[in-house]
Image (cartoon, rainbow, N blue to C red):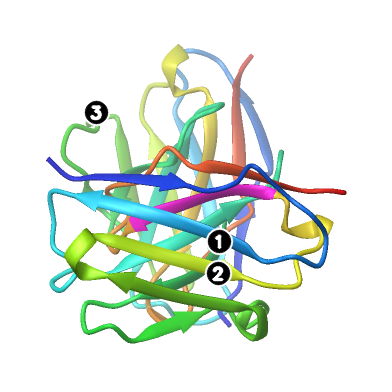
Amino acid sequence: DIQMTQSPSLLSASVGDRVTLSCKASQNIYKYLNWYQQKLGEAPKLLIYYTNSLQTGIPSRFSGSGSGTDYTLTISSLQPEDVATYFCQQYNSWRALTFGSGTKLEIK
Amino acid sequence: QVQLKESGPGLVQPSQTLSLTCTVSGFSLTSNSVHWVRQPPGKGLEWVGAIWSGGSTDYNSALKSRLSISRDTSKSQVFLKMNSLQTEDTAIYFCTSALGDYWGQGVMVTVSS
């Protein structure tokens, strides 16, 4: 199975900061990568699909990039409502999906 | 409007079998796949398995020997059965659409005697 490694596990930043979260795959996943946001007590919400496509209704301050094994989620200007845990998920191996362990984002 | 809703027992005894149902609306199971994902308390997400639009299934290799996913297309329901439950199977179980754009609210399953 493809392993997904996210870093950092915990990130503390100030409102208005530009924030970058990383996700690394154990092999080339050809941009088949989703990003999810999960707030406490809620189901995950799809933010970005296929590395850089913004899901409908998601604010434009969220963006994704990457290729090969290395991917990033960027929040251009952190807002208080962005406090959540963020997960990446590969679907290149579509018969064995895997998630990263998550990055918990806090406001400093 | 696409909706998914999980249902099932909140408490299961160790070594027993878990049975969950995902009832979908707003899309056809013969045209779309449904996945199960679980999340132990305070931990990350784990893909459990999927049933594809044609009815075939795929399972997490770590759970495959204990897991079965099936469906009833006439009732728009997908079923998850997992046997030989252990405390490590305690988690919130979600059903999701294939693209991950729709999720149920999840059902908490506790394995305890």
Residue type at the position of mark 1: Ser
In the image: residue B69, left or right of residue B56: right
Residues indicated by labels 2 and 3 sit on the same polypeptide chain: no
Point out residue B28 in the picture as x, y percentages from the top left corner.
Answer: 13, 63
Q: Which of pointers 2 and 3 indicates the residue nearer the eye?
A: 2
Dot label at residue B19: 1
Residue A37 lies within the magenta run: no
Q: Residue B14 location, x and y as percent?
A: 83, 60
Near-viewer residue (A12 or A2)? A2
Name the foreground residue: B48 vs B8.
B8
Residue at the location (38% across, 79% down)? A94
**Chain to which the residue tagged by mark 2 belongs:** B
Identify which residue is drawn at 15% across, 73% down: B30
Q: Are marks 2 and 1 in contact (CB under 8 Å)?
A: yes
| Subunit under mark 3 | A
Helix, strand or loop under label 1: strand
Work out how far the residue at label 1 is from the one at label 3, CA to CA, in angstroms.
38 Å
In the picture, which quadrant includes the N terminus of chain B? top left
Q: Which residues are magenta?
A: B91-96
Protein chain holding label 1: B
**Where does label 3 land, which residue?**
A59
Tell whether A38 sits left or right of A5: left
Q: Does residue B99 appear to the left or right of B17 in the view shown?
A: left
| Badge 1 vs badge 3, beta-carbon distance below 8 Å | no
- Which residue in the structure is indicated by mark 2? B81
Element type where label 2 sits in the image: strand
Q: Cα distance, mark 2 to mark 3?
A: 38 Å
Q: In the image, are marks 1 and 3 on the same chain?
A: no
Residue located 55% across and 27% down the image = A41
Which quarter of the picture shows residue B41?
A: top right
Between circles 1 and 3, the one closer to the viewer is 1
User: If you read the primary sequence from the N terminus, does the residue marked by circle 2 or circle 1 appear first?
Assistant: 1
